[in-house]
Amino acid sequence: MAQLLQIKTFKDSRGILTVLDSVVPFEIKRLFYIYGVDSSDRGGHRHHTTRQAAICIQGSCTITNHNGSVKEVFALDDPEKCLILEPEDWHVMHDFTPDAILLVLASTAFDPSDYIYEPYNNNTLRESQSP
């Protein structure tokens, strides 16, 4: 199940430093970022094995997540928020602000066979709103 974490951040007169070294609960094998998104949805999949950590380091976006039984909506509107996505989390990223930069850390290298594009059946869905 997806989990929203607060990232340790240090603020002073020189600026802000946010540290990820003890937040991400897996070894990072791939790092990518998404930006310049129009009104399109991104994602629309889950994985066989890959775990991910998503941080909107600039601007904001929304991630709608469904783990097979619960649908949750997460607002990534602060670079101190980190959304951990488990392999079973079918997720869609949407409502990107024009300046949004979404950083994603992944536990595996890219492998097209790891992706599952079929969404879950919504008959057993229970909805939840997350912060």
Image (cartoon, rainbow, N blue to C red):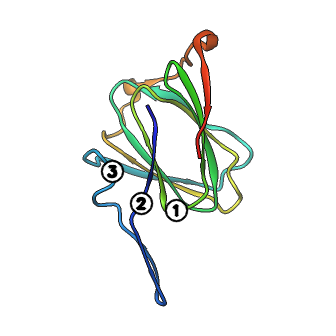
Q: Is residue 98 above or below residue 95?
A: below
Of the two numbered discs 2 and 1 on the same chain, state the one appearing first in sequence: 2
Q: Residues within 10 Å of mark 3 (few under 14, many from 20)?
A: many
Is residue 14 among the parts visible in the rendering? yes
Depth check: give the residue in front, 28 or 24.
24
> What residue is shown with label 2?
7
> What residue is shown with label 3?
24
Residue 82 x %, y %: 46, 52
The part of the image, by quadrant, that contains residue 99 is: bottom right
The part of the image, by quadrant, that contains residue 94 is: top right
Q: Is residue 90 above or below residue 29?
A: above
Q: Residue furthest left?
A: 27
Residue 22 x %, y %: 28, 57
Mark 2 in CB contact with mark 1 (< 8 angstroms): yes
What's the residue at 58%, 33% (across, down)? Answer: 72
Q: Is residue 90 above or below residue 22?
A: above
Q: Residues within 10 Å of mark 2 (few under 14, many from 20)?
A: some
Amino acid at the residue labelled 1: Pro
Q: Residues within 10 Å of mark 1 (few under 14, many from 20)?
A: many
Residue 47 x %, y %: 41, 27
Mark 2 to mark 1 CA distance (whole Å): 8 Å
- Secondary structure, mark 1, is loop
Mark 3 to mark 1 CA distance (whole Å): 14 Å
Query: In what quadrant of the picture does the N terminus appear?
Result: top left
What's the residue at 58%, 41% (across, down)? Answer: 130
Amino acid at the residue labelled 3: Val
Residue 81 x %, y %: 49, 56
> What residue is shown with label 1?
79
Q: Which mark's residue is nearer the viewer, 3 or 2?
A: 2
Q: Is residue 107 left or right of residue 13?
A: left
